[in-house]
Amino acid sequence: MQLTLTVVKADIGSVGGHTQPSQAVLKTVREVVDANRSSVGILDVYIGHTGDDICLLLSHPRGSDSAAIHELAWTAFRKGTQEAKRQGLYGAGQDLLKDAFSGNVRGLGPAVAEITFEERPNESFILFAADKTEPGAYNLPLYLAFADPMHSPGLLLKDEIGLGFTFRIMDVEHTQGDRIITLSAPENLYDIAALLRDTHRYVIESIWSRAHPGEQAASVSTTRLRNIAGRYVGKDDPVALVRVQQIFPATEEVGAPYTLIPFVSGDTRGSHNMPLCPVPINTAATVFYCVPIVSGLAFSVREGRFTEPADIFADPIWEEIRRRATRKAVEIRRQGFFGCAMLPMSELEYTGIVERLQRLDAQFVIERSEEAA
Ligand code: 13P
Ligand code: MG
Ligand code: MG
């Protein structure tokens, strides 16, 4: 059967700061989905949270960009926001930046990733959800899984995978439409790397099999909240779906690059470079600064019905990775605002620092002018 996986994520309010959604808000979101799922043909649902972001994973036969599916997610988050307001949660409705639904949640604030495919008899996929970071945070882990044999041995060991993958990379600075470049690994490897190094601007939007054209391997949400709001309202906190096994990299080939705990932008006030720390699902954001976190859930799905998820960052091996992340975070964050610990001005310009610098600019005096001399 043709199946679509849709994941929609939103921060609609959290307990005591940007920590985690309340149980009441999660319950409200679940109730709205449960009450309406059969009328729009939803086959299965998973709801969880990573930090203060709720992710709603839906399986259905309606295809990507289905207005009915998007509207249900929007309604669930709107109703959840009402509950968040009733409870006095912090940042209630934070990611719902527009009032009216107009056929698609893209452009309204929530992050969306979708894949439509002919379901395999043993369809396996991973849902990633990150908090306190931006969509480009997935650039490196996905590049390593789909283009680097040092991390992904399947690229050498299996012909179908070794034919490589096609990357669709979006210029997220371009706000009047989707500006996309399509490049294939391995022959365009250096071009892909040259773009992906700039995580603020170039974001992997999707990855496709070359051995089986039309088979989509990965989908990443590309929403940048600041592009919609025009100011800093919270970090984008992206989600991604990655199909695994057989014609795609194995689950462990997609998971292992997270051992690198790369520095990504995000953290407190979305303004720092900090390591991306892998955590179990339903983990609260930490007051250890507000270190960027990512969770990963592997599912099997048959005729649209999910198994229980396998939480890929929950096993004891990842404790060691988390300790390394802690050490990396302490080292860089100790230098506070200084140098590369804080983001460049191009990223900070959506925050209040702009007014401060404007004020200071007016106080500069030219003491020795070339013109006067
Ligand atoms: P979120 O983007 O997760 O809401 O966090 C915002 C923030 O500024 C935390 O310091
Ligand atoms: Mg928040
Ligand atoms: Mg968040």
Image (cartoon, grey):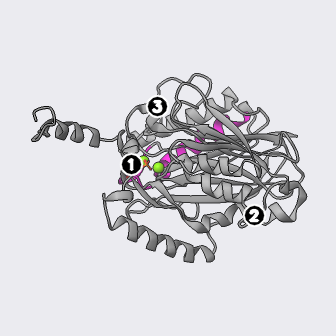
Magenta stretch in the rendered image: 13-38
Residue at (67%, 26%) from the top-left corner?
Answer: 67
Q: In what quadrant of the picture does the C terminus appear?
A: top left
Specify whether residue 61 is in view: yes
User: What is the distance, in whole Å, between disc 1 and disc 3 at their CAs?
Assistant: 20 Å
Any mark on residue 228, and which?
A: 3
Residue at (24%, 37%) from the top-left corner?
Answer: 355
What secondary structure predominates along the stretch shown in magenta?
helix
Any mark on residue 3, and which?
A: none
Instruction: Give yes or no for contact between labels 1 and 3 (Cβ–Cβ under 8 Å).
Output: no
Name the amino acid type tagged 1.
Pro
Q: Secondary structure at mark 3?
A: helix
Name the amino acid type tagged 3.
Ile
Q: Earlier in the sequence, mark 1 or mark 3?
A: 3
Q: Is residue 100 shown in magenta? A: no
Instruction: Give yes or no for contact between labels 2 and 1 (Cβ–Cβ under 8 Å).
Output: no
Any mark on residue 344, and which?
A: 1
**Where does residue 84 sit, x and y in percent of width and height?**
42, 43
Count residues near mark 3 (Cα–Cα under 10 Å), then give few for <14, some for 14-19, many for 20+. Answer: some
Specify whether residue 91 is in view: no
Quarter of the image where one finds residue 299:
bottom right
Any mark on residue 149, and which?
A: 2
351 or 148, which lies in front? 148
Image position of 198 with respect to 226: above or below: below
In this rendering, position of residue 269 left or right of residue 203: left
User: What is the distance, in whole Å, between disc 2 and disc 3 at their CAs?
Assistant: 38 Å
Name the amino acid type tagged 2.
Pro
Image position of 358 with respect to 49: above or below: above
Residue at (67%, 51%) from the top-left corner?
Answer: 190
